[in-house]
Amino acid sequence: MPAEAKVAKVEASTSQPASAPLTERQEARRRRILHASAQLASRGGFDAVQMREVAESSQVALGTLYRYFPSKIHLLVATMQDQLEHMHGTLRKKPPQGATAAERVAETLMRAFRALQREPHLADAMVRALTFADRSVSPEVDQVSRQTTVIILDAMGLENPTPEQLSAVRVIEHTWHSALITWLSGRASIAQVKIDIETVCRLIDLTDPEARA
């Protein structure tokens, strides 16, 4: 069962009703908007992402942009989900090589972290948006969480994760996002982030039924 199907099955009872799929033209427009958002954030961070400039750069009307993304926070959180999806594709081309699930997840998250490290302004803008997000941004925030879960489950390589293992995945997600915040604010070094990620990933081994047998 693909990781996406696992997550969908687990979250089916709590997910938002599916919206109508975008047409090819609408999807292309959305891609341009997300690309423009990432480019502006990469150059100047959170404050550089202004909706009017995003509209001009992506060649869409300002009103159209607001129909896709009601605010800058919605846009930047969606940008984070898009960046994670791109990272996931890269990770799939070169899977982690750790001997255990915990090692593979730690390697995967550190590779994703280093990708964000190469674009610190973009990382800061996306994480700030995620921090500022209120209930109106819940669908976008859920997509970020779902994408992170899929990345971790793929690294674990499990066909049928148990509820206990999924709980461990959620704790790992929280730690990874917290590590991003502390690093971006200058309160943690890369070395400390690596230690924290490796430590929390050991939860995977603790929830492995075979390891406890």
Image (cartoon, grey):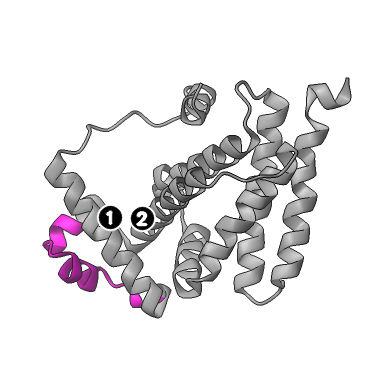
Which three-letter amino acid code belongs to the residue tagged 1? Answer: Pro
Q: Position of residue 119 (x, y in %)?
A: 47, 71
Classify residue 27 by image quadrant. top left
Query: Is the residue marked by circle 1 packed among few (<14), some (14-19), or many (20+) residues within 10 Å?
Result: some
Magenta-colored stretch includes residue 41: no
| Residue 169 located left or right of residue 122 | right
Helix, strand, or loop for circle 1? Answer: loop
Q: Residue at x 51, y 71 (%)?
A: 118
| Residue 89 located left or right of residue 52 | right
Helix, strand, or loop for circle 2? Answer: helix
Q: CA distance from mark 2 to mark 1?
A: 6 Å
Q: Pointers 2 and 1 in contact (CB under 8 A)?
A: yes
Q: Residue at x 81, y 22 (%)?
A: 210
Q: Residue at x 17, y 53 (%)?
A: 29
Magenta-colored stretch includes residue 53: yes
Q: Name the main secondary structure of what is drawn in magenta.
A: helix
Q: Position of residue 11 (x, y in %)?
A: 51, 27
Per the rendering, the mark at residue 186 is none
| Residue 178 located left or right of residue 94 | right
Q: Residue at x 25, y 53 (%)?
A: 31
Q: Position of residue 161 (x, y in %)?
A: 65, 25
Q: Position of residue 213 (x, y in %)?
A: 88, 19
Magenta residues span 47-65
Which three-letter amino acid code belongs to the residue tagged 2? Answer: His
Which residue position holds label 1?
A: 70
Name the outermost residue toward the bottom: 44
Which residue position holds label 2?
A: 74
Classify residue 165 by image quadrant. top right
